[in-house]
Image: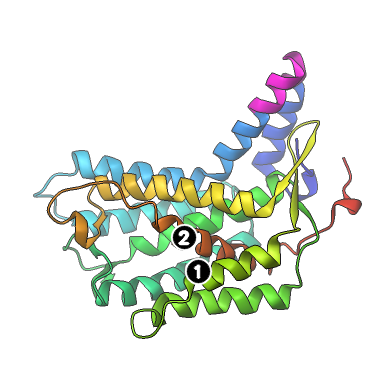
Amino acid sequence: MADRRELTRLETVLDAFADRLLPRVPAGVREFLAFGIKQAWACLFGGLMLAAIIATSWFYPDDAPVAQNDFLVILAVLIQIGMLVARLETGRELIVIIIFHIVGTGMEIFKTAVGSWNYAPGGILHIGAVPLFTGFMYAAVGSYIVRVYRLFDLRFSHYPPRWLTVIIAAAIYINFFTHHFIIDVRLILVLATVIVFFRCRMYFHIHRRTLTMPVLLAFVLVAFFIWVAENIGTAAGAWLYPSQDDGWHLVPLTKLVAWFLLMMISVVLVTFVHRPRPPDTYTC
């Protein structure tokens, strides 16, 4: 199902099992199942975090000795340790996840300070108004992207120069802060991202087939699913936007722009671990 040189020990066992099982089903169904299984596996960390947020919002007792926010931090740490012990993540992936955690927490501290959104109070494991579990939500995005890279053995054609993508990603991150004080240039940054990645295509290996799609479409699709997860998180009360203080409603679709730009930052960070490789070096 994937390049086994990139798989963890457990994933190698699961991959071998899938290689024996999937040929028994029709080709189209086989590829569909393999794609779904890989995507679900790549989302493991994010899925567990989202499940923890939902479960604690429904069942966590108000009089518990540990605050709900602190309990989520403890769960997140245990999930991360469990994934490392079980060899579900590689050491290189952990480095990226830590970077995502730091970058995300830094932005959270600033955004909550200026009132962009707010978290439920309580607990001692926080920096300012930011519970420490929030950094793990950004880490979940990083975990997904680095796992997708190796599970689907991603390759790219017409990938832009990395130095150019780094400049755009840095400008996007800076704009997340500066647009509160000076002109917001996010639409210009969206246009720059579209221009730079317009010709770039992503090749992903499923089971027996390798498919391709525009990288920009992948950005949009992942941004949409982050928006869906964000709606689940706000519905569970983990955090709220000011407009939701008087009653929950869907997060505006305009937030997709922010998540699209976050995808640009995320992909650039991951390229320092998984250097983009061209499809002509692909080996089935």
Seen in the picture, residue 144 relative to 263 is either above or below; the reply is: above
Identify which amino acid the numbered label 2 is placed on.
Answer: Val
> Residue tagged by mark 1?
187
What residue span does the magenta drawing correspond to?
Answer: 21-33
Q: Residue 142's spot in the image, x, y percent?
A: 54, 59
Q: Is residue 259 left or right of residue 70?
A: right
Q: Earlier in the sequence, mark 2 or mark 1?
A: 1
Q: Residue 282's spot in the image, x, y percent?
A: 87, 48
**266 within the magenta span:** no
Instruction: State which quadrant residue 205 falls in.
Output: top right
Seen in the picture, residue 259 relative to 4 is either above or below; the reply is: below
CB-based contact (under 8 Å), mark 2 and mark 1: yes
Q: Is residue 133 left or right of residue 6?
A: left
* Res. 85 visible in picture: no
**31 within the magenta span:** yes
- Residue lying at 50% horizontally and 67% vertically, measured from the top left: 100
Q: Which mark is residue 257?
A: 2
